[in-house]
Image (spheres, helix red, strand yellow):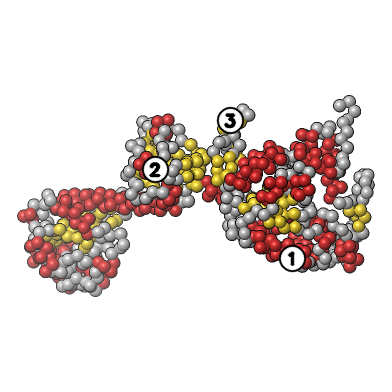
Amino acid sequence: MSADLRDVRDSFFAAGSARRNRSASSIVQPCVLESSHRIRDSGQGITDTFGLLSLGEIAPDDVPQTSDIGSIIHEAMVPIPERHGGCLCFYDQNGSLSELHCDDAVKAALIDRGISTGISFLETIAGTNAVDLTLRTRATVATVGAQHTCRLLDDLWMVACPLIFPDAELRGAVALIGTGEDVPAFSHQMVAGAAKLMTSHLRNLDLTRKLSQLLQEQKAIIDSISDGLLVVARDGNVQHLNSHAARILGVDPVLSVGRKFSELIDFDPIIYPLFQNGTGYKDEELLIRTPMRTLHLSDTAVPIKDDAGNVASIVNTFREFSDLQKVAHRLGGTRAVYRFEDIVGHSAKIQSAVRAARKAARTDGSILLLGESGTGKKLFAQAIHLGSGRANGPFVAINCAALSRDLIEEELFGRVGGVIDGVNRAGRPGKFELAAEGTLFLDEISAMPLDLQVKLLEVLQERSVVRLGGAQSFSVNFRLIAASNTPLVSLAESGEFRRDLLFRLSVIDIVLPPLRERQGDVDLLVSHYMEKYASDHSRDNWSIPTDTMASLRAYNWPGNVRELQNAVERLSNNANDFSISDIESPDFTTVDRKIYENPAFGFRLRPLQDHEKDIIDKTLKMVGYNMSKAARELRISKVTLYKKIKDYSIELRRPIGS
């Protein structure tokens, strides 16, 4: 029978493309006949050998390992009776033989005719065969004997079934191959069962591979975050510990997994009660002190519950409080932006102050900046900070005269959380803590109340701080720069400032000269601010007349550099056609006091002290001379208010009927 079929096949190919052999079409499946036509029409014809294409040249990267396929084939081969002598083979989606499983005799017979792993069964390589056709049609196909167009397959039968995943992805084929002229009855069921088993197993391999990849990605994400992360199971064992958590806790991240968390640390685990109460918390501040460690953390714990509502595990994240403070300051805190190069002036006195400040920046001692209002004390403080070894740390500034006594105390020392005055208030660190590893700048320190001066002295001596309402002390490491526009020595002599604090502050004294003593710097400063405001107002060029410039040089500048800057800005805002000419004068006629005339501006100029005295006087009248209300409106402390009332000789008069 097989000889007859071979004759039909040979005559079919010998007839050429114009002739169709009816006997051939009656004994083969339609897809087999279509393959024969393709091969005949392409001129390929009947061949005696396989092509040269190998598995290594066409196999995709995701072909499963042969060891995995071998185990699947071994399971599938168990029910096949040995008497049939069949060989179960796996092919990838490119038709290449990846694995074959059969007894040694059958395998040797196949290898003798060139069938081994790496051989491609695509039609262009191996001619008409069941493997190529099942990949084309996605259906079970059988070929036998002369239906093959490669004579090496003439005495073989093949039954192939596609491996199709639920998402319709074709992953390859499984085939049963044997010798003989007839396809065994059991072969179709056997191949279908093997295909089902292999599809299921390959799907599981894919899922395992994806889950493994997902796990590795999640571990990489967890280890890359800046927070420490700890997962503890209900039995107290550590399930996961990232590198940051291990560093903070001082434990080994690998050896700690699987051990009791309580055995790794020398303090009671804070999170253990959550297994009972099931209530987590967020961003709690923790201070843990043991003989072996001191931990100051911002801590969050999230209980993970099972279907019954019991806490199965706890996800605990935490970070060092100092890191949190740095982030807070980087995003919203005071920042130092001015450097020594930004200080404008060539006069001998300002250059002397700059040299002293540069030298002081290289030390870590407290610095006292003395100078009139507007001389640039804050600018110098920032330059010293950025020129010091603490430049990468925070720069924290607070004006002691701008806050009331209670507010300045809380700003400096912070407060513990809890119910305070009937209100549930969150705790927060003070400026002492926020300035850790950086610089704390206390401007107008002369306005600090005496009792707070005592507490400041204690902080400077002990280098620790206790928050308001608390008992625990926090170590602080900052560099202090203080500034005053009032001679502190005079205040100390009058008992308004503590001598011992003055000694502590003035390790290094730097006196900033007033603008009236800085010969030649007015021109430089005017030019500097003209460029600044020209840029702000998108002007390419504007100038100040010669006579106006002469008046600027002759003016006394009681408000110093700040007053000059404001004057140049005002000139810029009122400039016409990019030059200074006529400027309308503001109406100051309602103010009954001496007014300084300055022709440089085209309006009448008043010292800042006069403005301040006028504002304080009007505020007192507005609030009916209620000192507390006046201090709140002016945003200064009552001590500062009383001092200014005394300095300006403001008369305290109660309204009639009060």
The numbered mark, 3 or 1, whose residue comes first in the sequence reads 1
Which quadrant would the C terminus be assigned to in this image? top right
Please indicate, yes or no, whether residue 295 appears anywhere in the rendered image. yes
Specify the amino acid type for callout 1: Gln
The amino acid pointed to by label 2 is: Ile
Image point (90%, 28%), residue name: 656
Q: Which residue is mark 2?
A: 265
Say which residue label 3 marks.
419
Distance from the alpha carbon under mark 3 to that under mark 2: 32 Å
Write the residue at 31% across / 50% down.
207
- Of the numbered discs 2 and 1, the one sitting upstream in the chain is 2
Alpha carbon of mark 3 to alpha carbon of mark 1: how far?
53 Å
> Which of pointers 3 and 2 lies earlier in the amino acid sequence?
2
Image location of residue 218, percent across then percent down: 40, 50
> What residue is shown with label 1?
351
Helix, strand or loop under label 2: loop
